[in-house]
Image: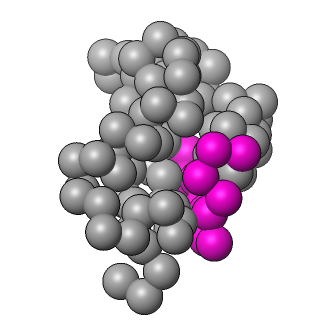
Amino acid sequence: MTGPIAQEIAQRLTAALAPTQLEIVNDSAHHAGHMGDDGTGESHFTIHIESAQFTGVSRLQRQRMVNTALGDIPGERVHALAIKARAPGE
């Protein structure tokens, strides 16, 4: 994980969801020259997150929790996010 946006993603998710595991993968290089590539090298990410807060929560609600924690990052500062959210033990 490098770059200021990736670091901000990690900080926001850590503060809001207290993940037991967190991996942020910058996929931007795979999308260079495509729609949404703003030239910053931080336009597309995959987030792998495990949090006890996801226990008993639907997949859709987990996605919403992550997006809420990220605030203005999705859609405004990052073109695309893939979110893989799970509870411990899943």
Establish if 77 lies above or below 82: above
Q: x, y (%) of residue 23?
A: 59, 61
Establish if 11 lies above or below 84: above
* Residue drawn at 31 percent across, 17 percent down: 35
Q: Is residue 80 left or right of residue 18?
A: left
Q: x, y (%) of residue 28?
A: 49, 36
* Residue drawn at 35 percent across, 51 percent down: 62
**Where is residue 57, by image quadrant?**
bottom left
Establish if 14 lies above or below 52: above
Observer-nearest of 15 and 26: 15
* Residue drawn at 67 percent across, 38 percent down: 12
Number of numbered labels in the structure image: 0
Q: Is residue 88 left or right of residue 34?
A: right
Extreme residue in the bottom direction: 89
Can residue 8 be seen in the rendering of this structure? yes
Extreme residue in the front direction: 56
* Residue drawn at 43 percent across, 34 percent down: 67
Q: Is residue 83 left or right of residue 24?
A: left
Magenta span contains residue 16 = yes
Colour scheme of this structure image? one colour
Magenta span contains residue 13 = no
Establish if 2 lies above or below 33: below
> Range of the magenta residues?
15-33
Image quadrant containing the C terminus: bottom left
Q: x, y (%) of residue 58?
A: 23, 58
Can residue 30 be seen in the rendering of this structure? no
Q: x, y (%) of residue 21?
A: 61, 70
